[in-house]
Each structure stands twice: as structure tokens, then as C-alpha cells.
Amino acid sequence: MAQDQDRWPVQNTMAQTHDESANYINTSRSSLLLSNRRTTMLFGDRTQPPAENPNNSPELNAQRKCELETVQNLNRAIETSIQHAEETTDKIKQLAQTVDQTDKLLDLWTKILSQAEHTKRLLEDPNWQGMDMCRLRLRSYDDQDMVMAQKEEDSERLMKDEEKERAKGDYKKERRRKKKRDDTHFS
């Protein structure tokens, strides 16, 4: 057995390390069980530091106090991060609203510039005869559109009427054929 220990020193070291870590884990787990915890730590005033456990060694109490401070620092950092994230969300919403308003204003400005360019071209056009002529021209376009729409309606109505007449004619022809067939069949 002694030879095996000399021959495999790495394996023995690993076995000892494994055993030590298993003991540490068991000790840590037992210290985390609720039966080992004081209720004053769970339900006590969080603004006051927890009282040291007289059943633990001073080193363990100091270690837990250090861990508590670390956890409190982490909590503060997380709370600060959450607060910054909420502020960032609000600022992003404000930015989105500003972008929407800017987009609407840009659309309005584009329409104004387009109208200004159109007006400038009209004023510079020597053939332009004023707004009255434009209105007359627009009315004539509207009248032409109305006439075209009326013609389309009339042609559609005429097509429907012709279809009805054809359907009536086909029905009458079919009735005549049936009557002839029936007459020849019964004769």
C-alpha cells in the first residue's frame, strides 16, 4: 500500500483534495441550513448590522460580516443599475417622441417648400392667366371626369340589361325546346 502511495502521488493528492472539498461543502451546507440561522437575521431591521452569532467562531463571524458587506455592495450596485436602466428607458421614450415630432414637422416643411416651388413656377410662367383660369380648367377637368363616370355607368347598365335580355331569351328558347320534346314524346 505504501508503494502505491509513492507510485501515484498525484492521485493521492487529488483524492485528498476531493475529500477536503467534500468536507468543506458539507460544512458550508450545514451552515446554510435554517436551523443554524438566527431568525433575527431573517426578520430583523435591515438598517442595523446583524448581531454576531455567539455559537460561531470570531473568524466565521468576521467572514460572514465581510460577505454581508459584499452582498450589500452588490445590492446597491444592482439597484443603481436598475435605476439607470429605468432612466435610460424614459430618455429613449422621450427621444422617440422627439423623433416623431421632428418627422411631422419635416413633412410639413416639405409640403410648404413644394407649394412655394409650385407658386414660384406659376408666377414665372408667362402663359399663366391667373387663378380664375386655373379654377375654370379644374372645373372642366371635373366635368370631364363626371361625364366619363356617367358614360361608364351607362355602359355598365346597358351591359347588364343586355345580359338580362339574353338570359330571358335563352330561357324562352329552352322552354320552347322542352315543349317540342314533350309534344313529340307524348304524340
Image: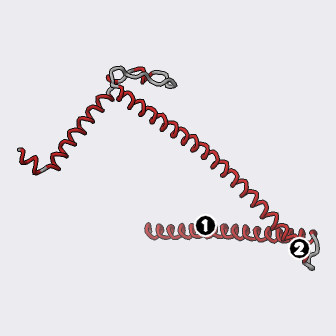
Q: Nearer the viewer, residue 57 or 116?
A: 57
Circle 2: element type: helix
Q: Give the mark toward the camera: 1 or 2.
A: 2
Q: In the rendering, at what x and y percent does residue 41 appear?
A: 42, 23
> In the drawing, does residue 136 fall left or right of residue 99?
right
Callout 2: 10 Å neighbours few (<14), some, many (20+)?
A: some
On residue 122, the disc is 2
Q: Nearer the viewer, residue 57 or 85?
A: 57
The amino acid marked with disc number 2 is Leu
Q: In the rendering, at what x and y percent does residue 174 appear?
A: 53, 69
On residue 168, the disc is 1
130 relative to 66, above or below: below
Callout 1: 10 Å neighbours few (<14), some, many (20+)?
A: few
The amino acid marked with disc number 1 is Lys
Q: Quadrant of the C terminus?
A: bottom left
Which residue lies at the image location 69% right of the left edge and 68% below the top edge? 156
Q: In the rendering, at what x and y percent does residue 107 appear?
A: 75, 61
Which residue lies at the image location 84% right of the left edge and 71% below the top edge? 118
